[in-house]
Image (tube, rainbow, N blue to C red):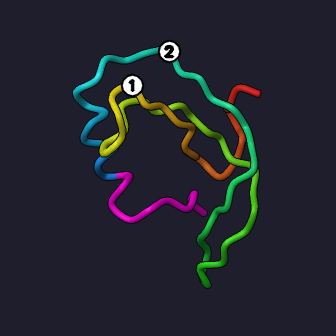
Amino acid sequence: MVPLMEAGKMEMMMMMNESRRKLGSFQICALCTCCGGAKGVCLPSPCCYAINCNIPHRPFGFCSFTPKTCNCFGCHL
């Protein structure tokens, strides 16, 4: 299962990520909607969120939490 995100948004975030400096990771566990499996079912699940800054089509310095995984294993609680 994967976190539900807008189409094309993840690819743009990955391209922008290559040009930015690396900071220490900050992650948090919270509820999100995850979709997947044979039937593409979407379920509320605990997800690991990470902070993303300078998101395309947002003002410079804008940051938000985005889901990275559909579990909280290895996520800072």
Q: Write down the residue under mark 2.
A: 24
Q: Residue at x 36, y 40 (%)?
A: 58
- Quarter of the image where one finds residue 68: top right
Mark sitting earlier along the chain (1/2): 2
Nearest the eye: 26 or 71: 26
**SS of the residue under disc 1:** loop
Disc 1 residue crowd, few under 14, some 14–19, many 20+, Cα 10 Å: few
Q: Write down the residue under mark 1.
A: 61
Spot occupied by residue 18 in the image (x, y as percentages of width and height): 25, 31
Which amino acid, mark 2? Gly
Position of residue 69 in the picture relative to residue 52 (left or right): right
Number of marks in the image?
2
Q: Residue at x 75, y 62 (%)?
A: 44
Q: Residue at x 74, y 43 (%)?
A: 30
Q: Residue at x 33, y 60 (%)?
A: 8
Q: Quick check: 51 above or below 39?
A: above
Nearest the eye: 72 or 33: 33
- Mark whose residue sits in front, 1 or 2: 1
Q: Quick check: 33 above or below 62?
A: below
Nearest the eye: 41 or 33: 33
Measured Cα–Cα span from mark 1 to mark 2: 17 Å
Q: Which image quarter holds the N terminus?
A: bottom right
Provide the residue span drawn in magenta. Answer: 1-10
Spot occupied by residue 34 in the image (x, y as percentages of width and height): 64, 62
Q: Quick check: 15 above or below 70?
A: above
Q: Residue furthest front?
A: 59
Q: Which image quarter holds the C terminus?
A: top right
